[in-house]
Amino acid sequence: MPNVAPVEWLGDKLRILDQTKLPQEEYYVEMDDYHKVADAIKKLRVRGAPAIGVAGAYGIALGTIKIKATSRDEFQKRLSAVIDTIATTRPTARNLFRAIERMKKVTESGKDIESIKSTLVKEAISIHREEVEATDKLSEMGAVLVRDGDTILTHCNTGPLATTGYGTALGVIIRAKEKGKCIKVIATETRPLLQGARLTVWELKRAGVPVTLITDSAAGYFMSRGEVNCVIVGADRIAVNGDTANKIGTYMLAVLAKENGLPFYVAALTSTFDPSLASGSDIPIEERGREEITHIRGVRILQLKDCDVRNPAFDITPHHLISAIITERGVRRLG
């Protein structure tokens, strides 16, 4: 596995690799306050559905061990405030809410305040370990689908940075390379925050995988020329019917893949599945601030300040456009 630790528990602090500074600088931040963890998630210093879930769990653990309360009722009230703060960070990522559900369940079975604190820390560590192990299994499952000589198109960032483990879509790609398959990757830049250009290219270069960077709008051009063999992307939430929410622009890639007769694979952990949502239309879509579009790294590129701006962070890919969903438990064929 690539030697990068985007999220690391230090016993009474959380250490993260600030992804907003990559690839120019590998800058680590230590946090001892759950508000700082929540802010890091909101501002994408830590990002990717699995990594958000892990960081959220540690944020709750961090907030919990700092609570001073004389009664269990007072403790639960303050703990609820910690959980609510973490829960309001990113609405689309299912892994975050699954982690929160697990942490809540732990609090219900604790005998006293100190035992609850200890158990919550242990649960956060377990969530982290399980996600890491699951990404390894998923990568092994998905690598079977990659053929020797394939050129794979991918979108956004789905490697160790996004998962704290091996990766999902990038994990599949990297594992295929490690198995000796001669593969190439075409990575979209992924506007507006350039996760593909900044993070995916950085991770693939470190893993020794040949990669070519393109603009988002060039994907159809390369597909139509026969320069792409398949598309592999990740997901932030998956509904019961197989509809997936992923980084904005994924839906367009699925349509283009269908038009050009290419397999379109989604690689996601089972912690990304939401059994409470029947279809993609029920998935909440986060809309982020206008500055992410009007500015790049703090530099204004749109001078018309009165221009309306919409910035949805995700879109929905219908299940009929998806060839298969790759998980740590196996490959589920769809389209």
Image: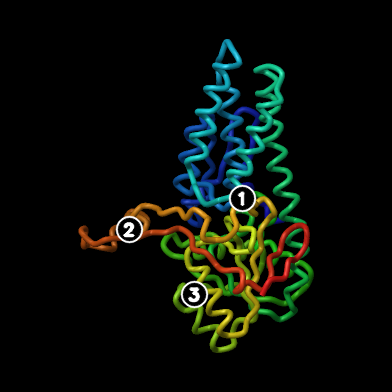
Disc 3 target residue = 214
Residue 129 % position (x, y): 73, 43
Q: In this orientation, which residue lies closer to the viewer: 158 or 127?
A: 127
User: Which is more N-terminal, label 3 or label 1?
Assistant: 3
Q: In this orientation, which residue lies closer to the viewer: 327 or 178?
A: 327
Number of marks in the image? 3
Residue 83 relative to residue 307: left or right: right
Disc 1 target residue = 276
Query: Residue placed farthest to the bottom in the image?
Result: 225
What is the secondary structure assignment of the residue under circle 3? strand
Residue located at (45% from left, 53% from top)? 286
Categorize mark 2 by other alpha carbons within 10 Å: few (<14), some (14-19), many (20+). some
Calculate the distance from the C-alpha at mark 1 to the C-alpha at mark 3: 37 Å
Disc 2 target residue = 295
Q: Nearer the viewer, mark 1 or mark 3?
A: 1
User: Which is more N-terminal, label 1 or label 2?
Assistant: 1
Residue 23 % position (x, y): 51, 57
The reply to whether residue 11 is visible in this rendering is yes
Q: Amino acid at mark 3?
A: Ile
